[in-house]
Image (spheres, rainbow, N blue to C red):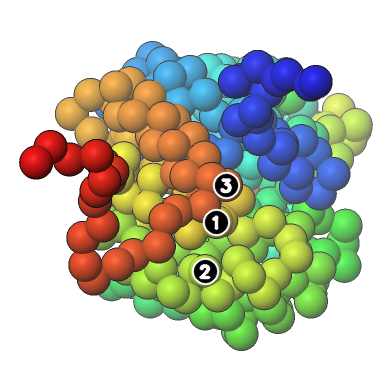
Amino acid sequence: MTQATIEITLNGETRQVAAGRTVAGLLADLGLHPRLVVVEHNREILDRARYESTEVRAGDTLELVHFVGGG
Amino acid sequence: MTTTTIDEAVKDTPLVIAGREFRSRLVVGTGKYRSNEEMVRAIEASGAEMVTVAVRRVDLDRTKEEGILYHLDPEKIFILPNTAGCYTAEEAVRYARLARAAGLNDWIKLEVIGDQRTLLPDVAATLEAARILVGEGFKVLAYTNDDVVTALRLEDAGCAAVMPLASPIGSGLGLVNPYYIREIKSRLSVPVIVDAGVGTASDACLTMEQGVDAILMNTAIAEAKDPVRMARAMKLAVQAGRLAYLAGRMPRREVAVPSSPTTGMLD
């Protein structure tokens, strides 16, 4: 049996992710440290305290950003 | 009789931005280094206490590409996020909010670009974004043109510092308009930090000699053949230029004046 997946837009790319994933779960799947990433969920900044309770839904747009070198 | 040591006699006041004190008057960027190790060493050599960083998407396919905070300790160096790459006020505000959500501080180096070739700022959009961000409680350090009218407007908008350019970003052309920079410095109460255009140590020295409070640079160090040496050169140049400004230069004269006595010469 194949696991149900949903389609989301992640950093501008269409991606399939497991249905029922939370933002915290998604970051863990991607190997990203939650303290070093900022999440924008459907154009709203998502407070870190809500990563565990926020479920990713089909059609969601997520942006994961961090600090890089710059002037 | 009071005596002071030479070190006390030449001591400078700290640079104060939004109530925070810095001893170093050199702020450095973290972009364009050949390696993170070289960047870390160059920052140390520069003596900078504040560095700029950019906000970008996490590269999902190259998870080995770590964020810059794997290499910089925010406990040891103050992180100033920027809105580099933004071309509208709305975009810059979005990037600033994302930067603040990272949880380090509420400072932002506001940069709204208006032209791709020169990377000169869109001053109307910069002002619009500055007003919004100040209203949201950000400490805004605004990158701007060497134009005193815009600089005054940014100060009125509540910016914590105003950062006119010496010349275009990444150009290394040095200080093209010392008069405009002096004018801005003489008219503003908030710190004036010259941001962009410095190419080498003499440019940094000459810029500080105009009386500005600090310099922000990136490419001049990162693109030097030896960034660590250039970072140290910049540290010394900023200190030298600052001291020369505080010391007050001699007047320029069109004729020579002897340095040795004209009396007591032999027959």
Do discs 1 and 2 belong to a common subunit?
yes
Question: Looking at numbered disc 1 in the image, what kind of residue is underneath it?
Answer: Gly
Residues under numbered marks 1 and 2 in contact, where contact means CB atoms less than 8 Å apart: yes
The residue shown at (49%, 69%) is B181
Q: Quadrant of residue B184?
A: bottom right
Q: Which residue occupies 69% across, 41% down?
A: B15
Badge 1 or badge 2: first in the primary sequence:
2
Q: Amino acid at mark 2?
A: Arg
Please name which of the two marks, 1 or 3, marks the residue nearer to the observer.
Answer: 3
Q: Quadrant for the N terminus of chain A, please.
A: top right
Q: Which residue is mark 1?
A: B211
| Residue situated in front as seen by the camera: B225 or B204 | B204
Report, in whole angstroms, how far the alpha carbon at label 1 lies from the one at label 2.
7 Å
B146, B225: nearer the viewer: B146
Mark 1 or mark 3: which comes first in sequence? Answer: 1
> Pointer 1 indicates a residue of which chain?
B
Horizontal arrangement in the rendering, residue B8 relative to residue A31 (left or right): right
Q: Is there one chain holding both mark 1 and mark 3? A: yes
Label 3 marks a residue whose chain is B
Confirm or deny contact between disc 1 and disc 3 (CB under 8 A): no
Q: Which residue is mark 3?
A: B246
Q: Earlier in the sequence, mark 3 or mark 2?
A: 2
Q: Secondary structure at mark 2?
A: helix
Residue B206 at what x, y percent from top left?
A: 37, 52
Q: Residues within 10 Å of mark 2 (few under 14, many from 20)?
A: some
| Tag 2 residue | B182
Real-space Cα separation, disc 3 to disc 2, in angstroms = 14 Å
- Residue B82 appearing in the image: no
* Depicted A70 relative to depicted B22: above or below: below
